[in-house]
Image (spheres, helix red, strand yellow):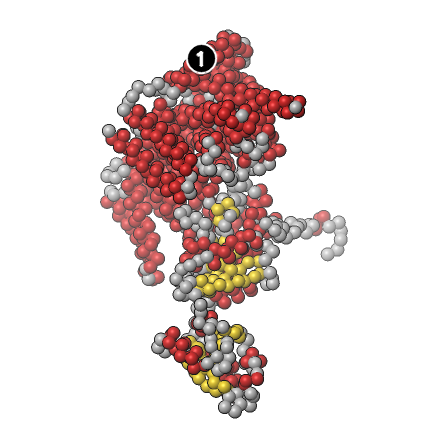
Amino acid sequence: MAQQIGTNLQENLRSLKEAVGNSNDIIFREFRTGDGDGINAAMLYTDGLVDKNSVQDFIMETLLIDVRNIDMTKKNIADILTVGDMQQLKDFDMLFTRLFSGAAILLLDGYEQGFSIGMSGIKDRGVTESSGEAVIRGPKEAFSESILTNTALIRRKIKDPNLWLETRQIGRVTKTDVSIMYINGIANDKIVEEVRKRIERIDIDGILESGYIEELIQDETYSPFPTVYNSERPDTIAAELLEGKIAIIVDGTPHVLIVPALFISFMQSPEDYSQRADISSLIRILRFLGIFIALLGPSLYIAITTFHQEMIPTQLLISLAAQREGIPFPAFIEALMMEITFEILREAGIRMPRAIGQAISIVGTLVIGQAAVEAGIVSASMVIIVSITAISSFVIPSMNMTISFRMVRFLLMGLAASFGLFGISVGIVALVLHLCSLRSFGVPYMSPLSPFILTDQRDTLFRLPHWAMYSRPRLISQKNVIRAKNQPPKPKPKNSERKGKAR
Amino acid sequence: MLENGKIGVRQLTILVILISIGDAILVLPSIPAIEAKQDAWISVVIGLAIGLPIVYLLTIVGKLYPGLTVVEYNEKILGTWLGKAISLFFLSYLFFSAAAHLRESSDFMITNIMPETPIMAINILFLGIIVMGARLGLETLTRTAEILFPWFILLLLMFILFLIPQADIKNMLPVLGEGIKPVIRGSIASAAFPFAELVVFLMVFPYVNQTNRIRRSFLLGALLGGIVLIAIVALSILVLGADLVARNIYPSFFMAKKISIGNFLERVEAILAIIWFISIYFKITLYYYAFNLGLAQTLKLREYRFLTLPSGMILLLLSLMVAPNITYYNEVISKYWPNLDFTYSILLPLLLLGVYALRKKFKRNM
Amino acid sequence: MWAIAGIIAVIIAIIMFEAPSLRRKQLRKELWVFSILLLIGFGLGVAISLHMKLPPALDWIIVIYKPLTDALIGLLK
């Protein structure tokens, strides 16, 4: 039971001061307001979280100066203060939550409630360029750490009153603001209800990043594949909302979650929609090719050179054999060593100071690779395979998915080394079995590839022009499936066909 | 409910195609070729002609109790004890079939592709994904089939296309040179292995979501599977000649070795082994899954998943026991297995239909 | 010797994997069937690893179907 705000101001103040200890960034300002002797009042705010000028102008000035002649006991505070966001507080829990969210708290002697006045002056990074998800054509703005900025950025893209926002405080100690946003009428109500339930079920002491929420609400905790999508870009989020998905925004992080997320979502980049349809389709196919190479590259090399040498054309076989002559290790160990080296370089590259970082990664890989080849530790072909594999894996737009593939790749390599192509086939079947068994909030993970939904094919392996994409994904939206009714553009009749009409 | 999944009719067709191709794509061509020589492909055509009515019969039985699997309505029609007994026989057939096929495919892998790997290792690896598939349930299995199917077809088409340059029509002549009887002798196996072995679908019908379209999709799948097999057998004869096809246990694999494109795409039979791996995998897994599900239904258990691990172990051991060597295996399979298939795909449905009709008559007369 | 130890290890692994969830859900009949299957597996495994002379399973098929097949082939000769 949260402690209620009593009518005695001094008692309230004493409890409050006890609760915050001696934190000297919480300012207590006591004063009297109203005519005559007036009533006792106190103002609390957190220095650094509130906009001090606003507090002074709108609250202090009004209460100290403007009401000097008004009997405060008969007036409603709400009718006096010239502020927008004002709420009544009943207990201390609410008080502290609002206090630390950047509100100023007003307590009056004789009143059973306190008032929280939104005066947030939190310093925000502002709307900057997205660092992780760069595009050539398309908006460059990205979310910031403040939840209100983020929801505002989304509202700017979708100006429909059906865009609904619900906020909760999650985390026993951090009381982080977590909001869900969805377009009522397009989003599937059952999924919205499920999201609500799962978020409310969370019981943890602190939420510091959306990744925490992701782990706590996702369907499959043991799968390496992500079932929750995340993005830093408002345009991506807005596009997903239009398809009927639900956005989860967490205060303190620019990474917004999207739910439900299917395998295909991780292969799509927002740029696909800004560029022309034919280019985007080709690039998407390139991405799928990239996945194949990233997943199977080293495994195929190991399998073929170890078990199925007869498949390699004779000339290539001779040169490969010559290369591998002096190498002391079997193909699998070679591949493993190179892959691990690459992973170390990649991980280290993230944390290196930007100036050195670029240089070292490129130089590191090439030089180490070159040196290793000349020292006779690995063969040149292995370096090529590993580099192509590593670069291909970056074609996948979403980091989550890349990480999953990295893990799976090692497993396939192990299978290839022990059982050759048979092992790889077993691995792939197991992988597909696993992917097909996943569900994201009830929606099968691999749709629309399987179950094969013809109408949703317009936006999976390739992308049809916007005028042809007239329906929303069937399993996700389930109402309001028709998106638009467009006519394909008709070219203007050429001059020779205009039958002599003047321009 | 033991199985909550639902599959669509298109997925059913895909499954049927994969299962009818099953292991037949690998072992079938040699069997009719022994009897019918260069007319082996006609045997397969006749086999299809015999097989389709069998498939039709299966759909009639399936429609009697659309929401129940065969082991469930066995009891309804034949009474509890007789029904359960017949169900157990049916289930042992499924299990046995799965074990035999597992042994057959591991043998193939070992002798042809990876001679230095111990057979136990291959068996265990293969068993791993079989058990995984059975545990994940019908819906996941079918979705996997749906995703792998385009690749299967792609590789198959490539296989056929790359071999056409080496086809020699003279190998097929004279057509019906020895008369029709040898051809019919060869067609028994051709009807059994691809089509009669579809009897496993009696365990799958209740889970298809559009009951009235099952017959069409099932027949379509069988037909398409049959056409593929006819093509493969015909191709084997055209490329290799009747003699080689009859002598080789795995003629299509032998054919794959002969593929040579532009002097650099050669000896790619290992990639083509992936085709048969896919179709055999689904056949064995579906049989194994049907066994576990059926066992749970017959014994009125509430779950089937926990059965997969112990019966997987038994499957592994049984597959080792099935035959001492491949010659014995081939002898028995080509001569006697078709009759086993027909027992369950013709006799059992006729029995069920007969008793069902009799019971209805009695009820009406009462 | 090692084979039998291996078989026992596998059986223990299977039990550890499946039995807890069965016991939690109070599925008694299922546990019985589970145990029986494991027993059969154990028996078979021991038999095979000791290289006991077991008839190949396909022998049964021959016994049951030989007369039928011979008749059928005879018809078509």
Residue A219 in percent (x, y) is at 45, 49
Q: Residues within 10 Å of mark 1 (few under 14, many from 20)?
A: some
Question: From what the image shows, is residue A487 above or below residue B356?
Answer: below
**Is residue B66 shown left or right of residue A383?**
right
User: At x 59% / y 54%, what residue is drawn?
Assistant: A186
User: At x 38% / y 39%, what residue is drawn?
Assistant: C18
**Is residue B230 shown left or right of residue A482?**
left
Residue A231 in sight: no
Return the residue nearer the eye: A420 or A357: A420
Question: From what the image shows, is residue A122 above or below residue C23?
Answer: below
Q: Quadrant of the C terminus of chain A?
A: bottom right
Return the residue nearer the eye: B34 or A437: A437
Residue A436 in sight: yes
Residue A408 in percent (x, y) is at 38, 44
Name the residue that disc number 1 marks: C66
Return the residue nearer the eye: A351 or A265: A265
Report in which chain the residue with disc 1 lies.
C
User: At x 46% / y 52%, what residue is drawn?
Assistant: A228
Dot 1: element: helix
Q: Quadrant of the N terminus of chain A?
A: bottom left
